[in-house]
Amino acid sequence: MNERGNQTGVQGLIDRIHAESRKICNRGEVTSYISELSSVDISKFGMAVCELDGNMFAAGDSDERLSIQSISKIFTLEIALKLIGDRLWDHVGREASGYSFDSIEHLQSECGIPRNPFVNAGALVVTDTILQGRIAQDCIGGILSHVRNLSRSDDVTIDRVVARSEIESGSMNFAISHFMKSFNRVRHDVDEILNVYSHQCAIRMTCRELARAGLILANGGKDPVTDERFISRKAARQINALMMTCGQYDGSGTFACRVGLPSKSGIGGGILAIVPGKASIAVWSPGLNGHGNSLVGSLAIEELARAMDWSVY
Amino acid sequence: MNERGNQTGVQGLIDRIHAESRKICNRGEVTSYISELSSVDISKFGMAVCELDGNMFAAGDSDERLSIQSISKIFTLEIALKLIGDRLWDHVGREASGYSFDSIEHLQSECGIPRNPFVNAGALVVTDTILQGRIAQDCIGGILSHVRNLSRSDDVTIDRVVARSEIESGSMNFAISHFMKSFNRVRHDVDEILNVYSHQCAIRMTCRELARAGLILANGGKDPVTDERFISRKAARQINALMMTCGQYDGSGTFACRVGLPSKSGIGGGILAIVPGKASIAVWSPGLNGHGNSLVGSLAIEELARAMDWSVY
Amino acid sequence: MNERGNQTGVQGLIDRIHAESRKICNRGEVTSYISELSSVDISKFGMAVCELDGNMFAAGDSDERLSIQSISKIFTLEIALKLIGDRLWDHVGREASGYSFDSIEHLQSECGIPRNPFVNAGALVVTDTILQGRIAQDCIGGILSHVRNLSRSDDVTIDRVVARSEIESGSMNFAISHFMKSFNRVRHDVDEILNVYSHQCAIRMTCRELARAGLILANGGKDPVTDERFISRKAARQINALMMTCGQYDGSGTFACRVGLPSKSGIGGGILAIVPGKASIAVWSPGLNGHGNSLVGSLAIEELARAMDWSVY
Amino acid sequence: MNERGNQTGVQGLIDRIHAESRKICNRGEVTSYISELSSVDISKFGMAVCELDGNMFAAGDSDERLSIQSISKIFTLEIALKLIGDRLWDHVGREASGYSFDSIEHLQSECGIPRNPFVNAGALVVTDTILQGRIAQDCIGGILSHVRNLSRSDDVTIDRVVARSEIESGSMNFAISHFMKSFNRVRHDVDEILNVYSHQCAIRMTCRELARAGLILANGGKDPVTDERFISRKAARQINALMMTCGQYDGSGTFACRVGLPSKSGIGGGILAIVPGKASIAVWSPGLNGHGNSLVGSLAIEELARAMDWSVY
C-alpha cells in the first residue's frame, strides 16, 4: 500500500474489503435479544472511513441506517463527562469486567458500582447521571441533538418501535437497575432511566453518519473540520482508553491485540473504531460473535488497520 | 513545556518529578509477599527515560538494581511469541481478568486457561511454553541472556536469595500450577515451572537497564540503535496491547485512562511504560497501591506523560 | 431434667431460658432492612412450645405479635406443594445456596432457577406459583386464611405499613424478580408478585400462634389436635428437610450441627423450629446475627433442645 | 410392608430392591477421576443393612470390597473430633458449599477456610489435623485401625495401587492444599497430607463392613453391640447433621428432601446412610450421577427408607 492515506488508496481498500466481507457475511448470529432487530438481514454490510480533513470513503450499505445500540454509550459518556468531568468516576469504574455485557458478576462484591461505562450497568449509571433531574423526554432530546451535531446530520432518528421492544425484552436491565438502586447507586426512577436508555440504544444512523460522529475522538475532542470543541482533550482520551480496554466487552483485549485501535460495538452489528490523529471508522454487519460483537465487522476493521498500518502501538 | 522531547526538556522534567516524588514516596505499602523484598527502603525512587535514538535521561536511584518481579513476564512473553507465535493464544487468553494478579477466579469456569499472560496463571503457562523440554537451568540462562541482550548490559543478574524466598512463599503459585495441571494446561513438572518462574521474577536491573530493555517495544520489535530485530512488529504490538489492557492487573483500565500508555508493573515497585515510536520509561518506587502497582511510580509516569503530551490516544 | 416432656418440665425449662435470655437480649443487631422493623425493641423476648397433644407452654412476650417475615416462606411453600406437588421442583432447587438470603450468586450460572424456596429468589418463585392467575388481593387473602387456619386464630393480621415499607426498600427483590423474568422463570408481573410477597412477609403473629401453626410439620402434615390434614406427609417431610438444610440461610449447617432440628428464621427476629413427632417451637428476639437469624433466639432453641434431648440425629 | 423392621421384612425388601436395581445399574457413569477405579464393573450392586442389635441383612455383591473414597471423610472426622472436639470448627466450616466436591469457589473469599469437612478442602484440613505431627505412615495406620475396630473386621485393607493412582491424578487436591497453605490453613507439608489423604480414600471395605462401621452414628457414638464408646453423643450428632447438609455435595439438599436420612457418598459408588436410633445402611453401585453420587445406590436407599418409613422428619 504505497498510497497510504490518499483517497484512491482508502477507497480502493474498503471496496476490496467490502467485496471480501460480502462473501462471509452470513457468519455469526443476528441478535435475538430484541425482536425488532432479530429480523435484520444478515447479509447487510456497510463501511465508512472519515479522515481528519473530513474526507469520507464508504462502501456497501453505508447509507442505510443501523440501530447503534451500545455504541450510544459513547455519546452519553461524552455528555456525562462534559457535565461532571472526573466526578463521574466516583460512580462508575474504569476496569474491564471479565464478563458479558449484561453480567451481574462483580456488582454484588463491588457494592453496586459498575465496572465500566460500557457494560450495561455502567451505561445505566451514565444515563442516570445525564438525566440530572430532567424528565426523560428532555434527556432523550438532548442525546439525539448531541448525536446530530456530531454527525452533522439531522436525519439521525430514534426508532421508537425498537425502543419499546427494548423495554419489553429488557428484564435484565431492570434487574441491574433495581440492583444498583438497592445500593443507592442510581438516583432516578428505574422506569425513567430505562426509558432514556432504551431510546438512546434505538438511535439509527448510517455508517457515514457514525464515522462522522466519531471524528472528535480522533481529534482530541474537537471537530477537525469545523474546529468546534465538543469535549476536552482529556475526556476524549479517556473515552478512547475505555474503548480500548472495555469497548468490546470480554472480547476487548483480543481486539486490542489484533487491531490496536479503540472501538465500541453494538448488538445491532455496528462498530465504531478510532484512529487517533487520523480517522474514524464505522462498519456494519449484523452477524455477531460469541461476545456480542460484529464478527465480519471486526475482521473488516482488522484488515483495514493492517493495510493502512493503523495501530496506536 | 516548550522544549518537548529535546534533551534539556526531558532531563529537567524528570529531575522535577524526582524531587516531587521524593516528598510523597512513603505512600503505599512495600510488598509483604516475599520476605526478601519486604525490607526494601520505601524511600527509594529511580526513573529513566530512553528515547528511540538511544539517549538516556535518568534521575534518583536509577543506577540501583531493583527486583523486576512481574515485569519479567514481558521478557518471557517475548521469548514465547518468538518461539511459537500466535499458537501461544491457544494456551492463554488475551482478556483482562477483573481480579487480582494471583486470583483463581475464572480458572475454574474457563477450564484452567488463564485470562492473559500477565496474571500469574498466564505467566506460568508462558514459562511452561519456553521450558519446551529443556531443564530449568538452561531455560533460566536463556531468559537472563535475552534480558542482557535487550538491555545491552551484562550486569543484569538473578538474585538467588529472592528466587528461593519466592519458592518458599509461593504457595499460591503452586496452587495455581497444580490447578492448571489438573486441566492438562501445563506440560512440565510444577516444581520445574516454578523453579524457572521464581528465577525470572528475581532478575535485578537498574531503571536505566530496564528502560533500555523496553526500547524494542517502542520500535516495533527492533532495537532502534543497533537495528537488531528481536521480535516481529506484530508481536511487539500484541505485547503493547496486552500491557495496555492487562499490564497493571485490575488497575489497568484506570492507568490506561489516566496515562494512555502501555505499561507493566512488578511488586518490587518497578514499572515499565512504552511510548510507541518515541521512548521507553522505567520507574522504581517500592510503595504499592491496592492493586499491587507502584503508587508513586504510577504518578511519576502520569506526570511525565502529561507534560510530554505522550499518549497513544 | 428428669421430667422430660411433662408440663412442669417444659414450663420450668422455658421460664429458665427466658430469664437467661433476657440478660443477653441486647446482643446482635435489629434489622435495618425495613424501616418499620428497625424500631422494634431489641429487649423483646418471647418463646412458646406446642406439643403434639396441643399443650402450650409459653414465656416472655409470647402474646405480642412479631413480624414473621421469611417464616412466611414456609406457609406459601405449604400452599404451593398442595397446589402442584413435586412439579414445584422444576422451578426451584432444593440445595443450600452458600450465600446470603438475597444473594444473586448462582442465579446467573443456573439460568435464573433459585437454589431453594427459602432464599428470596426461591420464595418469589413460590409466590409466583400460588398466584396462579389470581389477582394479588385474592392470593394474599388465601395465604392469611391458611395461616389463620393453621394457628387456629383469627387474630393473625397483616401489617400494611410494614408491607408498604417492604416494597419501598425492596429494590433487591425487584432486581431478583426482573432477573428471573429475563430467564422466564416467573409468569406474573413483577409488581404483582412483590405485592403478594411483601404482604406475606408482613404477617404478624404471636409466638403462641406461630408454634401452633407449625404443629402440622411435627405431625406429618396433619393437625394433631383436630386431625385435619393440611398437606401430605411427604410434603411435610420435604419442608422439614429444607428447613434443616436451608432454613437459616448460610447459617443452616451450623444450626443443624448445634441443634439438630429443622427451623426457619425471619429478620423480624422470629424462629420456628420443629421437633418431628413431638412439638413445635416458636421464639422471638429481634437481635440478629451476621447471617440474619435471631442470635438469642437460636441460643434459646439450642438450650431447650439440649435440655429436652430433642434432636433428629 | 406389614413386617416392618423384623428380619424377614428387611431381608425381603432389600432382595427386591437388589433385583430392581440390577435392571437399571448401567445408569450413570463410573468415575473417570482415578484410572484404577474407572475399570470397575458398572453392573456391581451390593447392599447391607445393620440394625442396632447387630442383625445384618445383605444382598448382591455385599461381600465384595469397594473403594470407599470420600466415605473415609466420616472416619477421619470421627478421629479429629475425638482429638480436638469443637476446636475443629475454627479450621473448617459447617455449611454446604453450593459447588462440587473439589470446587475452589468460596476458598478465596473465605480466606482459605473450607466450607465443610466433606468437600475435599475440608477433608484435607481434617487430615492435616489428625496428622498432628506424626509421620504419614503412623497416621494412615491409625485410620485403618479405627475403621477395622468400627467394622469389627481385620480384613479391611488399603489398596496401595489406588492410593498411588490418586496421588498421580490428584492435581486438584494439590492445588487446593497449596491454596490453603498460602493462607496458613494447613500445618503439615502438602505431600504429607496428600499421602495420608490418598491412603484413607483407598480403603477397601465390603458393604457389610461399611454398614457395621456406621452403626455408632446410629447409636450416639457407641457401638450398640459391644457397648464400646468411640465418640461422644454430641460428635455423633454433629457428624449426622453434616452428612444431612453436606454429605452428597451439591446433591445433599435433594437427597435430604427425598430420603430424609444423613448419608455420605464416595466416587467409588458407595453410600453410607444412617437411621438414627435404628440402623446403618451401606450400598454400592458404581454408576454416578452428575453430582458424583451413586445414582442407583441413591434410589435403592430412597426405596428402602420409603418402605421402612425411615426418615428423621
Image: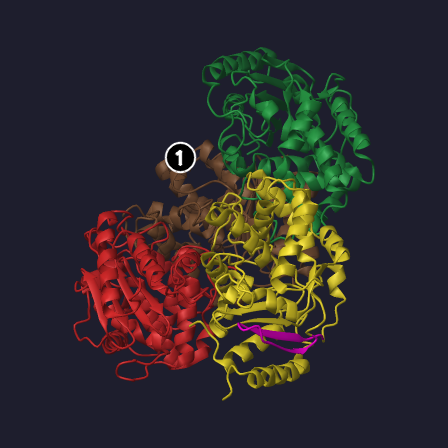
Chain colours: A brown, B green, C red, D yellow
Q: Is residue B105 left or right of residue B222?
A: left
Residue at position x 64%, y 43% in the image: B176
Vertical arrangement, residue D152 with respect to residue B235, above or below:
below
Q: Nearer the viewer, residue C87 or A143?
A: C87
In the rendered structure, which amino acid carries the disc numbered 1?
Answer: Asp
User: Which residue extends farthest front?
Assistant: D226
Which stretch appears magenta?
D44-61
Q: Position of residue A207 (x, y in %)?
A: 54, 52
- Which image quarter: residue A195? bottom left
- Give residue B184's position: percent from left, percent from top: 72, 51
Given residues B129 and A98, the one toward you in this image is B129
Circle 1 crowding by C-alpha within 10 Å: few under 14, some 14–19, many from 20: some
Q: Secondary structure at mark 1?
A: helix
Above or below C47: residue C134: below
Residue A100 location in percent, x, y? 53, 53
> What residue is at 47 percent from the left and 66 percent from the top?
C113
Q: Which residue is mark 1?
A: A86
